[in-house]
C-alpha cells in the first residue's frame, strides 16, 4: 500500500511540475494520508450499514432502482460526490496544484470512491450495482467541474440537512443519514440574482429549493415534499484565515436553520426549518 501511495504521489508531483505548479510534497502527503484513512473508515462504515447481508455474484439491480425511496437516494448520490469534489479541490489547491487540475483530481477522488461503493453493492444479494446511482454520482462529481468552466453557474450550491423523522425517533434506522424521511436536499442560489435590485450588502443570502420524502413503505409508496427557504452562503463571509475559511467552506454544504415554506403538498410556514 505504501508503494502504491508513493507512486501516486510521484504522479501528482510529476504532473504538477510539468505544468509549473508549486507542489508542496508535505501537504500532498497530508492529503493522501487523510484520503487513505477516509477510504478505510468509509469501508468500515458502509460494511456496518449495508454490506453485512448475503453475498452474491456481481449483478446489477434494475427492478426497484428507480422506485426506491421515490428517487431521493439519487439526489443523495449527487450530493456526496459534489461535496467531496469541492472539498478535495480546495485541498489540492492548498497542496499547490493549479485550479484546473485540482478540480479534476477532486472529481477523480469522489468518483473513484463512489464507484467502489457501487461495485461493492454489486456483490450484495440485497442491493446490486445501480446504474442510476452511478449516473447520479457522475453528475454530482461533474457539477463542480462544469462550474469551473462555466462561471455563469458557479453560484449554484447543493446542500443537505437532517431533522429526525417520527420513524427514526422510533428506531427505524441506526444512522440518520440512512433515513430519507429525516434527510433534506437543497439547491441554493443567490437571492440577489433571483430578485433584481436585492441589496448587494446581503450577497450571502440565498434562496433554496428543498426536497424530502414522507410515508415510505416496503412497496415503494410514499410522497414527496418540496420547500422554499432562505439559505446562507457562508463562503461569502471570508475571514482571511486559511483554516477557518476551509472549515467555513465545508460547513457551507449544510443547510442551516432558516425561515421556510412547504409548498407541496399543501402550504405550511416554518419560522425556522431545520
Image: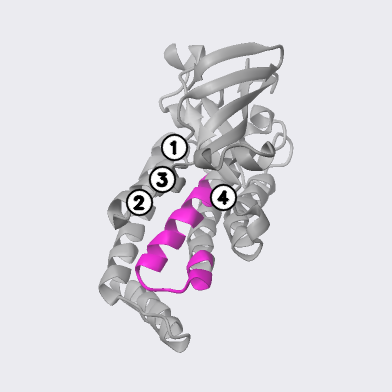
From this viewpoint, which residue is outermost toward the left?
26
| Residue under the point 49% across and 11% down | 166
Residue denoted by label 3: 237
Residue denoted by label 2: 245
Label 4 vs 3, first from the N-terminus: 4
| Residue under the point 61% across and 58% down | 147
Left or right: residue 165 compared with residue 60: left
Marks 4/1 in contact by CB < 8 Å: the verdict is: no
Badge 1: residue crowd in 10 Å (few <14, some 14–19, many ≥20) = few
| Residue under the point 30% across and 49% down | 244
Horizontal and vertical percent for residue 272?
Answer: 49, 18
Which residues are drawn in magenta? Answer: 80-103
Secondary structure category for the residue under label 2? helix
Residue denoted by label 1: 52
Label 2 vs 1, first from the N-terminus: 1
Label 4 vs 1, first from the N-terminus: 1
Q: Which mark is residue 11?
A: none
In three-dimensional space, the C-alpha distance between marks 4 and 2, rounded to whole angstroms, equals 33 Å
Q: Which mark is residue 118?
A: 4
Horizontal and vertical percent for residue 262?
Answer: 64, 18
Amino acid at each position: 500500500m505504501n508503494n502504491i501511495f508513493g507512486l501516486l504521489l510521484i504522479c501528482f508531483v510529476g504532473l504538477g511540475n510539468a505544468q509549473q505548479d508549486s507542489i508542496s510534497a508535505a501537504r500532498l502527503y497530508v492529503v493522501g494520508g487523510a484520503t487513505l484513512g477516509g477510504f478505510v473508515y468509509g469501508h468500515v462504515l458502509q460494511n456496518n450499514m449495508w454490506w453485512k447481508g448475503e453475498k452474491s455474484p456481481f449483478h446489477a439491480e434494475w427492478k426497484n432502482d428507480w422506485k426506491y425511496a421515490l428517487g431521493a437516494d439519487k439526489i443523495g448520490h449527487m450530493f456526496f460526490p459534489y461535496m467531496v469534489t469541492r472539498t478535495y479541490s480546495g485541498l489540492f489547491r492548498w497542496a499547490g496544484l493549479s485550479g484546473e487540475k485540482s478540480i479534476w483530481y477532486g472529481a477523480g477522488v469522489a468518483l473513484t470512491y463512489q464507484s467502489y461503493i457501487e461495485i461493492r453493492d454489486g456483490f450484495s444479494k440485497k442491493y446490486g450495482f445501480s446504474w442510476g446511482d452511478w449516473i447520479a454520482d457522475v453528475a454530482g462529481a461533474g457539477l463542480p467541474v462544469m462550474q469551473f468552466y462555466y462561471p455563469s453557474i458557479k453560484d449554484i450550491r447543493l446542500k443537505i440537512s437532517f431533522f429526525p423523522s417520527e420513524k427514526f425517533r422510533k428506531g427505524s434506522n441506526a444512522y440518520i443519514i440512512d433515513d430519507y424521511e429525516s434527510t433534506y436536499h437543497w439547491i441554493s442560489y443567490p437571492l440577489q440574482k433571483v430578485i433584481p435590485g436585492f441589496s448587494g450588502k446581503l450577497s450571502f443570502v440565498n434562496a433554496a429549493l428543498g426536497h424530502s420524502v414522507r410515508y415510505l413503505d416496503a412497496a415503494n409508496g410514499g410522497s414527496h415534499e418540496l420547500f422554499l427557504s432562505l439559505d446562507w452562503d457562508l463562503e461569502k463571509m471570508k475571514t482571511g484565515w486559511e483554516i477557518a475559511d476551509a472549515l467555513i467552506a465545508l460547513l457551507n454544504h449544510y443547510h442551516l436553520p432558516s425561515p421556510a415554506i412547504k409548498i407541496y403538498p399543501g402550504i405550511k410556514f416554518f419560522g425556522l426549518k431545520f
